[in-house]
Image (cartoon, rainbow, N blue to C red):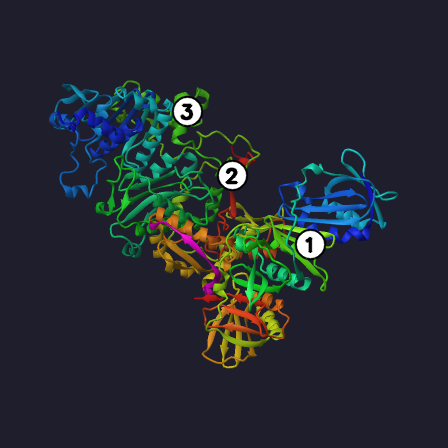
Amino acid sequence: MSRIRILPDILSNQIAAGEVVQRPVSVVKELVENAMDAGADRIIVEIENGGKTLIRVSDNGCGLSRDEAVLALERYATSKIYTKEDLFSISTFGFRGEALPSMASVSKFSFVSRTADNVTGTRVDMNGGKLSGVTDTGAPVGTMVEVRQLFFNTPARRKFLKSENTESGHIADALAGLAMGNPGVGFRLVVNRRSVKSYPPGQSLFQRAQMVMGKAVADQLYEMHWPETDEDAAGGLPGLSIRGVCANPGVTRSTANRIFLFVNRRLVYDRGLISAMFQGYRGRIMKGRYPVGAVCVDLPCDQVDVNVHPAKREIKFITPGPVYKALSLAVANTLFRGQDDELSYARAVMNEKKASPTPLQAALTSASLPETEKKMAPDLFESASTSQSPPVYDAFDSPPESFQAAEPREKSWPPAPDTKLPAQAPLADHEPETPESGMTTPLSAPEPFQSTQSGFRVVGQVLNIYIVLEKENHLVLVDQHAAHERIVFEQLLNRYKRMDVQSQSLAVPEVLELSHKEALVLESIMADLAGLGIRVEAFGGTSFVIKAVPVLVEQKQLGPLVVEMVEKISRANGTGIKDDWLEDALATMACHRSVRGGQSMSLKEMTALVAQLFTCDNPMHCPHGRPVFISFDARSLEKLFKRVV
Amino acid sequence: MKFSFNKKDILEVLAKIQGITGRKTSLKITSDILIKAAESKITITANDLETVFTGTYDAQVETSGILSINSKKFFEIIREYPNENICINEVENRWVEIGTGDSVYHIVSSDYENFPETPVIENVNFIEITAKDLKKMVAVSSVVGYQNEEKRIYVLGSLIEKAAVEGEDVLRIVSTDSRRLHCFDASFTGDLDLGDSRVIIPKKGLAELGKFIDSDIETIKVGVKKNHFVFQRANESIMIKLLEGDYPDYRLVMNFEGMIPIEIDRAMFLTLMKRVSILTSEDCKSVIFNFTENNLTVTITNPEIGESKEQLMVGFSGEEIKSAFNPRYFMDALNLFKDDIVTLNIKNSKSPCIIKSMKNNNLICVIMSIHLS
């Protein structure tokens, strides 16, 4: 007998499951994406025991007929592509035809579906990949998939599953991501028969972002879109559009996991996009911090390859450069616009500490928190009673109150617990319209400061560090060092740009040994580097020598910096050269030349400083990303004094 | 232990070793000096783990012993002490009593057992070199400094090697920071044994050594043994641990091929460089040299400050050369020369400028150009 055999279907499906179904969250993701491909606008995800005991996804999509339902469970059965050409322009989430049979092969699986023109629905039951029954059943239009006892027949896989809380958290995070990318679709997450998350259907991206990002971030989001003008559109990739939200730079995280990226509605992870986003935030956030936001990139399906990985988390842009550039511009423009209203921009900056619970935390608390703490996050819990008995096909027919609560509600947040921290505590929770109001003004450089026009009145200096200003019922504090640093930095930067590039030749050229890939990158940017004053020459093979360095950083050994630059570019698929180190050098110079904290200033000096500050391109942050302004509005002061409660 | 000494015998050496013990360090005891008293002599040791100084001086030793005491505080107390004769007495528990009578100090000393060991280096093949030449070697090395975070061995240290010039062996020192390179040859007597034929000596240690060369007439013994550069003079010796690493081929930039020699008045050119450097700034360091027939024009334009223009008659003929340099490097280099006339050697707008004496090639200073674009 031949040693080589064709694997039986069950086995090959189990192997495929190894790639597609790694843990409960993968099942949820596949099923929810299927539901969205079926045109559903209401999707309910129910899980028990972190998805290990039960995952049920119900939708109100188009449904399948009896024949289709049976066929759908065969491997490589899909309704989404028909020809080879389709594979290169995929507009649906799924297309490989692997998901259903894979998950059916490693679970106790049932599938109920009805189309609008059929009176009865079809129920298909499978057990470890074996068909155990096809019956008629009563069902609403749409599809419900139940995956029970995931990995019951693959004990090794089961062992790798983490605790209930961890798996629930992953599911909640994934659903938040999916919800963010599809604001038109209503989602509900039911954990252990209790509804913990509801996103109503028909929301705008901005509304959805406010809900997903949480209360504290909700009023600090700016809406962005690209192209903004015909000029943008003409200069960029045809058909490329970017929508999204980005948060005030005062709201940051220590990881990139609150940046949601969507390419043609698909949630993806792409270093280049994250790095482009950073570029947009440049000069506004401190080192080591990550911005918060959601980005939806839409471009013609043939401009992006999604078939890179079975889970489709990674994608490849055919021409990444223009996409990244557009994103950086979109973010930068949006933030500039946000700065037009400097009072609300600065006020938002100081709310940093009051971060919302992440969906992960939310899911965990929902499962285990005692009653008393639940009022901390009321909207997560309110509708618990509506979904007691599964399956919950019609939960959406009577939307609970929380669905209408797109706007953050003030009263549900606890009062400031500690008045010793007035700058952080009580100011977080009002005026969600602020970011939108910033949107309406057209993009333009900030107006030059004139105390009569812009209405800032210099009150005086406190602690020899802060300048106190007043404007339109706002109390504004300015860090004099940060402000002066920004002014000097921009002067130095402008001056540097106008001067000849001075490049000090080296008696001992620095030799760089690179990999082949890095060598190609370096060759491609050699001309740009020369423009910055770094003269690199090929030295045979993958070796290069640095022959000259910019005089500004001539003391430094530039080899490691150049290698780092090349590594960054090759990782991020070419987002362009960053001369961060040059700006760092200028920022250090600016820092040394600036008025220090602790130096007393006359009213005249302060007025001049504030006036100069408003001629800067980016007056809101010092070159290291620290805020220059902090503003308090009348209302928050009143709150501090308990004039209003 | 108990001993006393005359203030003037010790004060000077205490001042000179402050550079070794004054370094920022995580090993606190390197800020101490070790004093050993025995047989009417005291031996003072300072050791920063790279440079080790030992000196022996006359003293009246009552009971012999050894102690480790903070160098800076000890120096300041001795410097300000009102009497010429100062008595040091270890009382108990490492408490040290300094002085007697009206001014008395009690100072906590450290456990001398923790003081870093002094390397034992014997039978060094010393060569003799004039103090003047050694001083020049130190100057050539230390004028090319570096910043705190520097890691390149060839910038941290200077090369010392034996070179043959016109059939005669010379001791050569080369110092660079990659933007300029200085090379100086000293003659010597004796049998030079450099071990690896070329060694790299830390600029910092060499500068400390420079403080002990105070006479222009005496000759000094130096040698290399066991990975140390050893300096010996009468009752004092210094050992500097050598750096390990490669030194680049400095001869490549000392290439006179095709260079046009231009004689120039050193003092006049130096003051000219001083004047044009007034307008330089951290982000604008270069001045433009323009050599035309019998003329050198030096200009600088610094936006927001202004510009200056200097002219000097020089013996130049040929095609015009326009190049940019950092004038401070010229000032450093020209100060190393004693000659009235030196030659500048330059080939084209990209080439370095090499300065040397008219008479010989003992001292060569290479200054790399700055490209403007």
Chain that bears disc 1: B
In the image: residue A438, left or right of residue A140: right
Q: Say if residue A601 shows up in the picture.
A: no
Mark 3 is surrounded, within 10 Å at the Cα level, by few (under 14), some (14 to 19) or many (20 or more) other residues, namely some
Identity, as a three-letter code, of the amino acid under mark 2: Ser
Q: Which of marks 2 and 3 is in front?
A: 3
Chain that bears disc 3: A
Magenta segment main secondary structure: strand
Mark 1 is surrounded, within 10 Å at the Cα level, by few (under 14), some (14 to 19) or many (20 or more) other residues, namely some
Question: Could you give the CA–CA distance between mark 1 and mark 2, rounded to whole angstroms?
Answer: 75 Å
Q: In this view, does B105 lie above or below A449?
A: above
Q: Is residue B105 above or below residue A360?
A: below
* Rendered location of residue A380, percent (x, y): 38, 27
In the image: residue A107, left or right of residue B74: left
- Stretch in magenta: A498-516
Q: Which of A51 and B101 is in front in this view?
A: B101
Residue A503: within the magenta?
A: yes
Query: For mark 2, what is the residue?
Result: A636
Residue A365: numbered disc:
3
User: Marks 2 and 1: in contact by CB < 8 Å?
Assistant: no
Identity, as a three-letter code, of the amino acid under mark 1: Gln
Residue A353: numbered disc:
none
Query: Which quadrant of the figure contains the N terminus of chain A?
Result: top left
* Rendered location of residue A11, percent (x, y): 20, 25
The answer as to whether the residues below labels 1 and 3 share one chain is no
Q: Say if residue A181 shows up in the picture.
A: yes
Residue B232: numbered disc:
1
Mark 2 is surrounded, within 10 Å at the Cα level, by few (under 14), some (14 to 19) or many (20 or more) other residues, namely many
